[in-house]
Amino acid sequence: MRAGAILLVFLFLGNAILDFFRISIESFRIAGGIIIILIGLQILFGIRSFKDSQQPDDLSAVPLATPLIAGPGMITTTIIFSKEYGYLITIIAIAANLLLSWVLFHFAHRIVKVIGRSGSLMLAKFMSLILVAIGVEFIRSAFNL
């Protein structure tokens, strides 16, 4: 619920914030792409940006809700989507993301039972690589490459 509220605030105010600070959408794409790449690399290589006593590959050490569901990557995507596709498509994308996140969190224990710890870690590493590729695409699109 909190993540959805945060994303809706940035959906409707994100472009105004960028305009206020005179930040072009291209610069925001590059900055967002860099952040998404860094998040993906942290997951891929098991780097922690905060100190805790958890093991590097412990999936439970990842903070939930706001930092990842409505974190920098999703906020960046929301603002860029609203600029490119309008509010309706972006709201549908936010709703789909939140619904998928809820389903995955709700059934996480069952999913882990089926694919196991090794499968979970492998999936996390693969998805982090996809995240890095999305960040690269954000940067490439800012330069129209």
Image (cartoon, rainbow, N blue to C red):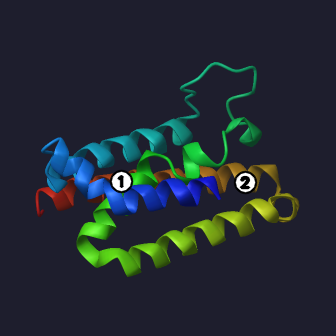
Residue ID for mark 1: 76
Can you give x and y, in whole percent of width and height, for residue 50 in the image?
59, 23
What residue type is disc 1 on? Thr
Measuring from the top left, give residue 117's x and y in whole percent: 80, 50
> Residue 107, position in %: x, y?
82, 65
Q: Which residue was labeled with disc 2?
A: 120
Q: Residue at x 17, y 50 (%)?
A: 19
Q: Is residue 125 left or right of residue 78?
A: right
Q: Around disc 2, counting alpha carbons within 10 Å, would you say few (fewer than 14), some (14 to 19), or many (20 or more)?
A: some
Q: Amino acid at mark 2?
A: Ser
Q: Nearer the viewer, residue 112 or 6?
A: 6
Instruction: Say above or below: 39 vs 73.
Output: above
Q: Could you tell me which secondary element the residue under label 1 belongs to?
A: helix
Q: Earlier in the sequence, mark 1 or mark 2?
A: 1
- Location of residue 95 by image quarter: bottom right
Residue 67 position, x and y percent, is 56, 43
- Please report the residue visible at 51 percent of the width from the left and 36 percent of the height from the top: 42
Q: Is residue 6 visible?
A: yes
Mark 2 secondary-structure assignment = helix
Locate the C terminus by quadrant. Answer: bottom left
